[in-house]
Amino acid sequence: MNTVPQNWQDRTELLLGPDQVGRLKKASVLVVGLGGVGAVAAEMICRAGVGSMTIADGDRIEPTNLNRQLPALVSTLDRYKTEVMAERLKAIDPELDLEFRTEFLEGDAIPALLDSRRFDCVLDAIDSLTPKIQLARACLEKHIPLVACMGAGARLDPEKIRCADISKTFCCPLARAYRTGLAKLGIRKGIQAVFSSEPAIRSAIREDSSSPHKRSTTGTISFMPAVFGCHCAAAVIRTLLREPDQA
């Protein structure tokens, strides 16, 4: 078994200091969704030195993933994203306490997963609205900080990406639908959302009934999901390093 070099976090420690690096080492993060956004975010969280992670996704890698998704290579086509990402994350940090769930999380499976171990933060990189809302409700009920990614597709300007409370999101159809769904549950704030203020390019969206887990297919360029993923990872790291009285 490979071992991680002792000084591999030297640059992170130079930036944050040893106490904060130790704090990340003790942290546990759940990443749900390993597409263009979630896979990049999971890798950035791993490289930041977070010591425990659970990743979840039910998808296999498809040819159309090759233009933007981190685990997508010709050599990995038709493999489960969880398996490929688990190999990649353990190759970065062999000491990472890693669990992966190859399933689409929804319904009762969500609170069950949240109860399976202690999570200091959850990252929602799910494409489908219903499980996003279910995950948000469960996290808030269990007082687990949540970072939720909104729509990364049909956009081209990375400078328009930002992070704010869900109540302050705008110009994003997915965020609007998410807010509406949350409002029906009496939830109007308390979730960090990564979104774009760039209007969606309508011609880049087409109706799609080929999968029960999505209603449309959205055109996406290589770099946008990756930048969204970095913003998501940054929000997670900020949450993990936040002092208790700042929560």
Image (cartoon, rainbow, N blue to C red):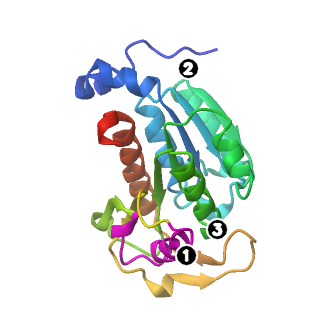
Q: Amino acid at mark 3?
A: Thr
Q: Amino acid at mark 1?
A: Thr
Q: Mark 1 highlights which residue?
A: 218
Q: Mark 3 highlights which residue?
A: 130
**Disc 2 + disc 3, Cβ < 8 Å:** no
Instruction: Specify start and end residues of the magenta stretch as a single range.
Output: 166-186
Mark 1 or mark 3, whichever is nearer to me: 3
Q: Mark 2 highlights which residue?
A: 95
**Disc 1 + disc 3, Cβ < 8 Å:** no
Residue 66 on the magenta segment: no
Q: Is residue 137 shown above or below 20?
A: below
Decide which of tag 2 and tag 3 comes sooner along the chain: 2
**Secondary element at tag 2:** loop
Q: CA distance from mark 2 to mark 1?
A: 37 Å
Badge 2: few (under 14), some or many (20 or more) residues near its Cα, within 10 Å? some
**Secondary element at tag 1:** strand
Q: CA distance from mark 1 to mark 3?
A: 18 Å
Residue 185 on the magenta segment: yes
Q: Please, what is the dominant secondary structure of the magenta stretch?
A: helix
Residue at 64% in and 14% down? 1
Q: Amino acid at mark 2?
A: Glu
Decide which of tag 1 and tag 3 comes sooner along the chain: 3
Where in the figure is residue 60, as x and y percent of width and height?
A: 72, 54
Image side of residue 152 versus residue 76, left or right: left
Image side of residue 21 versus residue 150, left or right: left
Q: CA distance from mark 2 to mark 3?
A: 34 Å
Q: Quadrant of the C terminus?
A: top left
Residue 17 falls in image quadrant: top left
Where in the figure is residue 165, as x and y percent of width and height?
A: 36, 61
Badge 1: few (under 14), some or many (20 or more) residues near its Cα, within 10 Å? some
